[in-house]
């Protein structure tokens, strides 16, 4: 499965946006277990804003970063003590824009199991893993219907390991599933089954001030 993923991502041509806005990068770490998992983080509950948000390790690009892959690996080292040399890069996904107007570039990497990862307590509460099979089988809890530039986007919301995975992270997951694993899932097509939760524009404006940056 992972070898096929590597080949598909290497053949994938992600969308790259040339926009004048702040940049960030995240790492989607796949843990190379007999049943592969995907690693997530959760922002610390003591933070004054955006506490409890589930995300992939990553953050804003610094001036000294030579490229965005370096940003993703540097932030992963700082946030969860993931050594960059233990990450095997599998590919890159399309750029996405956060509600805060930050251009986010996702990278997919393979990491060994049982590394001594430690969450930075100043930023994170916990690190957790979810079996890839939950996403491959599309066991979503519901679908958030979010208008983006006048077009509806169908963003899956997953409940796993006592956490909620949704929003920008789920948008990245959809591309990973579609392009990396050939799964029949799309942000632009309504899923055939399951509950839909519509986000009115007013609520989105509220989320714009509450949803954390990557």
Image (cartoon, grey):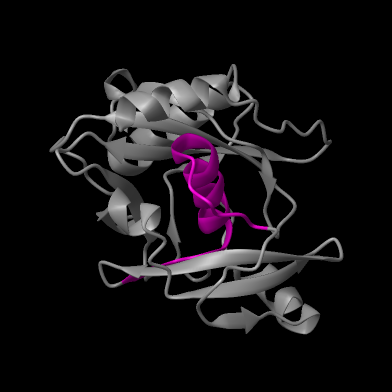
Magenta stretch: dominant secondary structure: helix
Most foreground residue, 213 or 166: 166
Q: Where is residue 20 in the image (x, y as percent from the top left)?
A: 84, 36
Question: What residue is rendered at 44% in x and 39% in y?
Answer: 181
Q: Residue at x 79, y 78 (%)?
A: 201
Magenta stretch in the rendered image: 163-187
Instruction: Tell me the residue at 31%/47% (across/down).
Output: 39
Kindly tell me whether residue 150 is visible in this rendering: yes
Could you tell me residue 18's position as x and y percent? 81, 30
Q: Quadrant of the N terminus?
A: top left
Q: Is residue 42 left or right of residue 148?
A: left
> Residue 106 or 212: which is nearer the viewer?
106
Residue at image location 50% in from the left, 65% down from the top:
166
Is 176 in the magenta? yes
Membership of 174 in magenta stretch = yes
All told, the count of numbered labels is 0
Q: Is residue 52 something that shows in the picture?
A: no
Q: Residue furthest right?
A: 150
Q: State the image coordinates of residue 33 (x, y, percent, origin top left).
A: 17, 38
Looking at this view, is 36 or 208 the one in front? 36
Query: As displayed, is residue 51 above or below residue 198?
Result: above
């Amino acid at each position: 499965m992972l070898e096929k993923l590597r080949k598909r991502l290497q053949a994938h041509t992600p969308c790259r946006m040339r926009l004048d806005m702040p940049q960030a990068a995240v790492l989607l770490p796949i843990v190379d277990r007999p049943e592969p998992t995907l690693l997530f983080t959760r922002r610390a509950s003591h933070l004054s804003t955006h506490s409890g948000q589930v995300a992939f390790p990553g953050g804003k690009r610094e001036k000294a970063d030579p490229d965005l892959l370096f940003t993703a690996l540097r932030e992963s080292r700082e946030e969860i003590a993931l050594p960059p040399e233990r990450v095997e890069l599998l590919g890159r996904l399309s750029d996405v824009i956060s509600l805060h107007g930050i251009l986010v570039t996702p990278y997919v990497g393979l990491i060994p199991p049982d590394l001594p990862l430690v969450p930075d307590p100043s930023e994170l509460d916990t690190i957790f893993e979810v079996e890839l099979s939950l996403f491959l089988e599309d066991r979503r809890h519901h679908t958030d219907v979010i208008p983006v530039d006048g077009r509806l986007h169908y963003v899956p919301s997953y409940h796993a390991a006592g956490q909620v995975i949704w929003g920008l992270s789920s948008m990245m997951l959809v591309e990973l599933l579609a392009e990396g694993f050939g799964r029949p899932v799309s942000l632009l097509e309504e899923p055939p089954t399951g509950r839909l939760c519509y986000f009115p524009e007013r609520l989105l404006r509220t989320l714009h001030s509450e949803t954390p940056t990557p």
